[in-house]
Amino acid sequence: MTGLSNKSKKFWIARDYEKCSGCRRCEIACSLYHENRIWPEASRIRVFMLVPGAEFPHFCVQCQDYPCVNACPENALSVSQIGAVIIDKDKCIGCGQCIDACPGKIPHLHPIKKYALICNLCNGDPQCVKVCREGGWNTLKKVNRKENMNYRKYAKTPEDLARELAFIFYGEKAEEIIPC
Amino acid sequence: MLGYAGRILEVNLSTERVQIRSFNEEILREFIGGRGLATKILWDRLGEKWETVNPIGEENLLLFLAGPLTGFFPGGRICISGKSPQSNGVIGSTVAGEFPIELRCAGYDGIIVSGKAEKPVYLFIVDSETRILDAHHVWGKDGKQTVRILTREGRRLLKQTFPWRGEPKEPAMLYIGPAGENLVRTAAVMGKWTHAAGYGGYGAVMGAKNLKAILVKGSNPLPEVYDMEKVNRLIEAVCKKCYEATDFRRWGTSSAGYNVGAKRSAEPVKNWQEEWHDEKSFKVEEFERRLWIKKAWGDFGCPTTCLKVAMVKTGRFKWALGDNPDYELQAYVGTNLGVFTPEGNVYLASLVDDLGLCGIQTGNVLGFAGELYQRGILTSEDLEGLELEWGNIEAFAELAKKIAYRQGIGDILAEGTFRAAEKIAGLKGKNVLRCAVHVKAVAIGAHGIRSGKDYPMEMSYACSVQAGDHTSVAYLPLTHSASELTVAFHDSAVYCWFNMFGQPPDLKWEFYKAVTGVELAPKEWYDVKALRIIHLQRAMLLLGGPDFRWNPHVHDENPPRFYEPLPSGPYAGKAVDKKRFEELRRRYYEAVGWDENGIPKSEVLRKLGLKDVDAALEKLRRDV
């Protein structure tokens, strides 16, 4: 793919949840990269399993209007050259307003350090995409970011995503088994 | 010690007391974790009164133990143990999932559950806080409903605990179904609808403690390791090799449902009356085409993701939902019951999962009942109207329910094949034990030994300290990858050893060193540490009780069926050669350090530092 090697180029991580195996290798790669530990709760990408078999990764979609950035009362959030949300850990007070502003309730707070965790696209080399493609699951894919796309529509709550996926997989049976 | 959270949580359900236990470095070096540490804990705490401990009584301990490699070695598992309601010994029964990861991130390497709750409860563990919560609303619920209700409840409780954190991921969960609640000896400890720690019957131990489920969430990272960079490199190396296992990744063990039957002729058919079939309808491609709705499903860190989600989409079993039966369940709730349709097989597998029954143990006892019906020993009247013909899926399903709820004949069959056979023999005055395919009350895994084309040897089950457990077989040489001395390492460091397939055998020691910083020479493992674990398991197995005690002369033996010639297939006429079996058994005793009566030798026990075990076995030596 031409252009993607350019580190300043904006890109996006396309996601095909139906292919997610629930292996959580993305959580491992993410937390190793950002925390140098295997630390699922501190991973910027989190795999939810509200319904077994219907696992999915939940992580920032970089809405074109960045409601989280706008909602931060401390100006701790900004948008990087590649389109990622960047958190200034020193400024973040862990108030959670970015979570409330996110249409998908995607940000979460670091379990110990209590600042907001939002995917920063690993400064251009997303580790989750790497492991997901290495293993051939291909749930995640790096694509060019388009200026006129509505990315915000991909920001969904874990409940909504679990529901959607459960119905795709299990049809009307889903009604009996979804916890939300 | 590096690689460990360093704490074990003990919950006494009688007193509701919660304590933290820890083990010093010497013990951890010797017993590692999981299965190894379980033998140490069980011997130290129950050894003196082992013969009188009722496995499904208040005095038993139920252990959930991870190991130092859990979460690091790709493919996380946890080892469940205690005194087994099947063998009366100790079985290390492992199950995959995120439970041990959350547990270690909460700061524990394991949980010891003692005592018995007055009323049904579940445990909710979040970091250093453990709550014992009322479970009456989920008592009686099947697997899927239990998962549904407790996932919702668990997330609500997490939101209350950490209101500032944002949307909580679900806590990890292990639970029992109705079978465990009703103290069925073939009940499993379950996870994620379809995952089961089946061997051992620990679902009944959990039920006997009135413990419906354990939920856990950990906020911290996995424990600190000796060399994180090296661990990373090893994770990558393991994954790379696993990615090359194309067939296994695509089909898991489920391609064996046809292949082991047709080619190796080692698959139970109609309660092991045959071990061969050539039913093309049972080829994995048929399952894939008709039933799969997800072709790669896996657990924490797994590069293989050998599971598949399957659902019946048409016909009378429509909406039956679970994983694609693995080889064992294709055999045990498939061919062993004369069931050769993928839809019927998925239905029965999902049913036993929902009921919280071990598919292997239950499929074995269902097959046993099927054969007694075929021989006219059990009648439709005995079975409350069921016509238990081979392949009658609905009848076998009804019987599985009767077992889970201990209704009618189900109450007898709920005791597992061996104990049920003893009872039925008494009731009917017929020698039905010759139809019971088990070793020491543990139904044999779906890998026969008559054709000689599968992996177990003639003495593999007879001499195993986990009896019929096909994942832990006696093997010569002792250092072979299939030997239970090798498996004891996988089950003590606790990881999925399917991901060790095709890896250099030394990789596991390297991994252990990178995580703990401790050098473990293979010789030290096989000559001392593994041997100690095996001897402890053997000692507790032979002490047994309270209802049965095994005599090696009688019970280190194959089921009678394995001496009957195979009636069909490419190896028709073959049976286990009794002389060869006896010779292999003798050689195995000698190699592992047991005397000619199968009892661990004094000098070996003393060399392993097990003087008290030696003293306890003295009475067995006298009796023999």
Image (cartoon, helix red, strand yellow):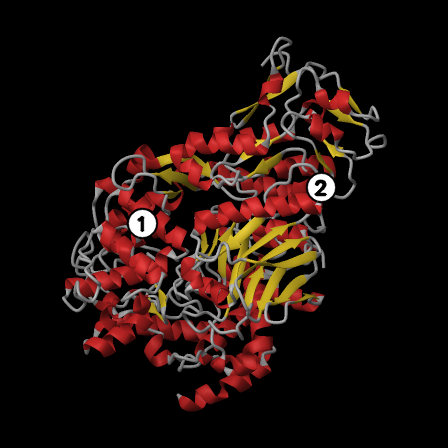
Q: Chain of mark 1?
A: B
Rendered position, B94 above or below B157: below
Mark 1 lies on a secondary structure that is helix
Give left or right: position of B241 versus B340.
right
Query: Residue B607's x, y, as percent?
Result: 59, 78
Query: Residue B414's x, y, as percent?
Result: 34, 66
Q: Residue at x 60, y 76 (%)?
A: B44
Q: Residue at x 32, y 71 (%)?
A: B418
Residue at the disc numbered 1: B348
Nearer to us of marks 1 and 2 is 2
Q: Residue furthest left?
A: B376
Quarter location, residue A39: top right
Task: Looking at the image, tell me whether mark 1 or mark 2 is earlier in sequence order.
Answer: 2
Q: CA distance from mark 1 to mark 2?
A: 42 Å
Do callouts 1 and 2 mark residues in contact (Cβ within 8 Å)? no
Q: Residues within 10 Å of mark 2 (few under 14, many from 20)?
A: few
Residue B427 in sight here = yes
Give left or right: position of B304 versus B460.
right
